Image (cartoon, helix red, strand yellow):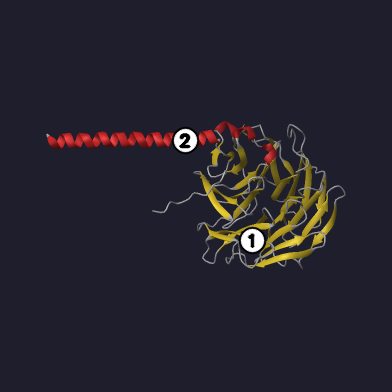
Amino acid sequence: MSRQVVRSSKFRHVFGQPAKADQCYEDVRVSQTTWDSGFCAVNPKFMALICEASGGGAFLVLPLGKTGRVDKNVPLVCGHTAPVLDIAWCPHNDNVIASGSEDCTVMVWEIPDGGLVLPLREPVITLEGHTKRVGIVAWHPTAQNVLLSAGCDNVILVWDVGTGAAVLTLGPDVHPDTIYSVDWSRDGALICTSCRDKRVRVIEPRKGTVVAEKDRPHEGTRPVHAVFVSEGKILTTGFSRMSERQVALWDTKHLEEPLSLQELDTSSGVLLPFFDPDTNIVYLCGKGDSSIRYFEITSEAPFLHYLSMFSSKESQRGMGYMPKRGLEVNKCEIARFYKLHERKCEPIAMTVPRKDTVSRLEEDVRNLNAIVQKLQERLDRLEETVQAK
């Protein structure tokens, strides 16, 4: 009789824990705009989300601890003249946030400590260079004041925020169609992009050259998202020809075949990947889904291992991801998401149970099994007694 060997992993028992009602942000009007971004950005000081606003585009910024019901007259960041599509906090300054909008501009804002008292209409700087709406903004992970933006004009611009000048331009000759996603490598030396022309590209932005390219990583026609993961690999999410959602892992040096390709389900929402380099776990959040799947990436085959799934009743309109420095590590928290409902933002903590907790749970299961066995033996004896009479 063969025994199935369970793969050893520290993160096999990771579970999601939604926050209690008083720790959520209630009565927020999440944007109804159709766009495949997270609509939410968080850091250790603030939570920001794109909200519905009349007469232009706006987003809400709240101090992280200011939970509960949000006042309907709360001050907003409202300098854009058209809906905001993406927001991103600066990794080097927790008070600075960038926003991209349908008004073709990128604006950089400074939020005062303690949050806004009055509506904020004047940005620190406005970056103008795109000719169509700006759907992606991403700060450089290691260099200060360097911001990337991607627009529906098929252009990627890298800005020096200090001077307001575009220092690098990747034009329509690199991306001939709409750009779906852009991700910096961990050291900021490369960027990874996915495009409507069904190609994923790894680009060295300083030279403006494509160093690796994969045509049709997923056979379907729906949007593909790509992120850098560990050891020069990239992870993509997309759709098969039969509209089944897929996740694939690729080695950038050998893009002919994926290291791993897994089919998930037949939902229609685009999967947004979030990678944690400290634990090598990638989290997949689908817009319109009510679940978060997570996988562990290892250096040996089959490379991509399904861990578990957090499920809830309500679907998500967007998702924010807390940087590691904002987590409560003394409570064994390894990730925290901010899930956007239609009128609420709900924190979800991903936790690794302590070893003694797992041991206690396993011992409880053994004890319960023993009790069930004893009860079954008693029942059998009672049946024998009844039959004898």
Residue 116 appears in the picture as rendered: yes
Write down the residue under mark 1.
250
| x, y percent for residue 210 | 75, 65
Q: Residue 280 or 288: which is nearer the viewer? A: 280
Near mark 2 (Cα within 10 A), the count class, few <14, some 14-19 or many ≥20, is few
Q: Residue 128 or 53: which is nearer the viewer? A: 128
Given the image, on which type of amino acid does mark 2 rest?
Leu
Secondary structure state at the residue bearing disc 2: helix
| x, y percent for residue 196 | 66, 64
Instruction: Looking at the image, tell me whether mark 1 or mark 2 is earlier in sequence order.
Output: 1
In the image: residue 58, left or right of residue 147: left
Q: Which residue is farthest left?
A: 389
Residue 240 image-quadrant placement:
bottom right
Write down the residue under mark 2.
361
Q: Residue 268 or 301: which is nearer the viewer? A: 301
Q: How far apart are marks 1 and 2 (CA)?
A: 37 Å
Near mark 1 (Cα within 10 A), the count class, few <14, some 14-19 or many ≥20, is many
Q: Which residue is at a point 67% across and 57% down the rendered structure image?
A: 233
Given the image, on which type of amino acid does mark 1 rest?
Trp
| x, y percent for residue 320 | 64, 44
Is 293 placed above or below 217 here? above
Secondary structure state at the residue bearing disc 1: strand
In the image: residue 338, left or right of residue 137: left
Query: Is the C-beta separation of discs 1 and 2 under 8 Å?
Result: no
Q: In which quarter of the image is the C terminus?
A: top left
Q: Which one is in front in this view, the residue at disc 1 or the one at disc 2?
A: 2
